[in-house]
Image (cartoon, rainbow, N blue to C red):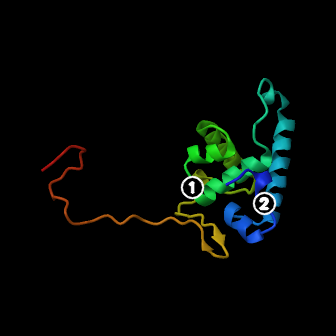
Amino acid sequence: MKPYAQLPTDNPEEYKRLVGLSKEDFQHLNSKLCVYIGEQKALSPLTRRGRKDSKLTTEDRLLLTLYYLRHYPTLINLGAVFGISESYCHKVYSRTARMLAKIEKLPNRKALLEEGQSATLIIYAPEGIDASEQRIERPVKGQKDFYSGKKKPHG
């Protein structure tokens, strides 16, 4: 994984495999993200007072977030690729993911629970399902009838 400026742009299939989006979709999402960040800065210009500018460009922040969602590497590995610390990598990922959820108007967890039905958000790609949620099967047999459920060793 390389920062955005070093990504292969000549091969669209490789680009999509690395990032998870086509180059046009990435550019569209990046432009929406830049507009959102500009609007937030215009709403409260004093919140940036005393802070240094980010080491990463907007493209690199978006790339970090999409790469994490696509491949799920550890944050220390992802931070090493982008030349940042593990904690800063987590900060960049969480902020950008929240911004993307607001930009794309995705329902949050609370809104999904208020509907009264269990809803699952599945990202569909032409190649198949990218992420899904499944129940974990637990064994029914083997538990003693008199076990109270307390977290202590029992025989």
> How many discs appear?
2
Image-quadrant location for residue 8: bottom right
The residue located at (68%, 62%) in the rendering is 18
The residue located at (85%, 42%) in the rendering is 38
In the image, residue 72 sits, relative to residue 134, either above or below, namely above
Q: What element carries label 2?
A: helix
For badge 1, the amino acid type reads Tyr
Image-quadrant location for residue 122: bottom right
For badge 2, the amino acid type reads Phe
In this view, the residue in front, 13 or 35, is 13
Outermost residue, left side? 155
Q: Earlier in the sequence, mark 2 or mark 1?
A: 2
Q: Dot 1: within a 10 Å radius of its alpha carbon, few (fewer than 14), some, or many (20 or more) residues?
A: few
Please give the residue where the numbered disc 1 appears in the rendered image: 72
In this view, the residue in front, 94 or 82, is 82
Please give the residue where the numbered disc 2 appears in the rendered image: 26
CB under 8 Å between discs 2 and 1: no
Residue 95: where, in percent of width, then height?
68, 43
Residue 86: where, in percent of width, then height?
59, 39
Left/right placement of residue 87 relative to residue 98 reads left
Q: Is mark 1 on a helix, strand or loop?
A: loop
In the image, residue 129 sits, relative to residue 42, either above or below, namely below
The residue located at (19%, 63%) in the rendering is 142
Q: Residue 101 carries which label?
A: none
